[in-house]
Image (cartoon, rainbow, N blue to C red):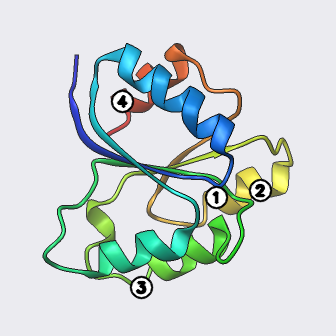
Amino acid sequence: MKKVNLTYIVDDDKIFIFVLKKLLVKNESFDQVLDFKNGEEVIKMLSDKNNILPSIILLDINMPVIDGWQFLEQIEKLPNKNKLNIFIMSSSIDKNDIEKSKSFSTVKDFISKPINNDKLNKLIENI
């Protein structure tokens, strides 16, 4: 099984983050997991060339300050964007959201909440 060194969770829902972190620890494929309440903090970290890039970014669409779409628009401008594996995790089942996610080169997949171990294993296979 593949190992995921560093995972970023970008979501403002504290309960979802808590449950997802428990699931990631239980999965044993995920080493270090950091969570962020909005995309702005992550953009700053990814823009700093001294920071280690995450193996995976798990991104929610609906957040304060900077939402998932705005985050993706800014990520597309980064020189290291091709090294990123972003997976949108959303409770949205809107086909427009799913189609829109495909327009971003950094987005590997659109995963509907709730997240379970099978979805995590499939996600790991896509990196």
In depth, the one of 12 and 46 nearer the eye is 12
In depth, the one of 64 and 116 nearer the eye is 64
Where is residue 101 drawn, in percent x and y? 64, 58
Q: Are marks 4 and 3 in contact (CB under 8 Å)?
A: no
Residue located 63% across and 77% down the image: 70
Q: Earlier in the sequence, mark 4 or mark 3?
A: 3
What secondary structure is found at the residue carrying circle 1? helix
Distance (Cα) linking label 1 and label 3 = 16 Å
Q: Earlier in the sequence, mark 1 or mark 4?
A: 1
Per the image, the residue denoted by label 4 is: 124
Q: Where 62 sits versus 26, above or below?
A: below
Per the image, the residue denoted by label 1 is: 101
Disc 3 marks a residue whose amino acid type is: Lys
Per the image, the residue denoted by label 3 is: 77
- Name the residue at the left extreme: 50
Q: Quadrant of residue 110?
A: top right
Disc 1 marks a residue whose amino acid type is: Ser
What secondary structure is found at the residue carrying circle 2? helix
Where is residue 126 drawn, in percent x and y? 38, 35
Q: Are marks 2 and 1 in contact (CB under 8 Å)?
A: yes
Distance (Cα) linking label 4 and label 3 = 25 Å
What secondary structure is found at the residue carrying circle 3? loop
Distance (Cα) linking label 3 and label 2 = 21 Å
Distance (Cα) linking label 4 and label 2 = 22 Å
Q: Is residue 52 left or right of residue 103?
A: left
Q: Is residue 88 left or right of residue 123?
A: right
Label 3 crowd (10 A; few <14 / some 14-19 / many >=20):
few
**Residue 97, disc:** 2
Q: Earlier in the sequence, mark 4 or mark 2?
A: 2
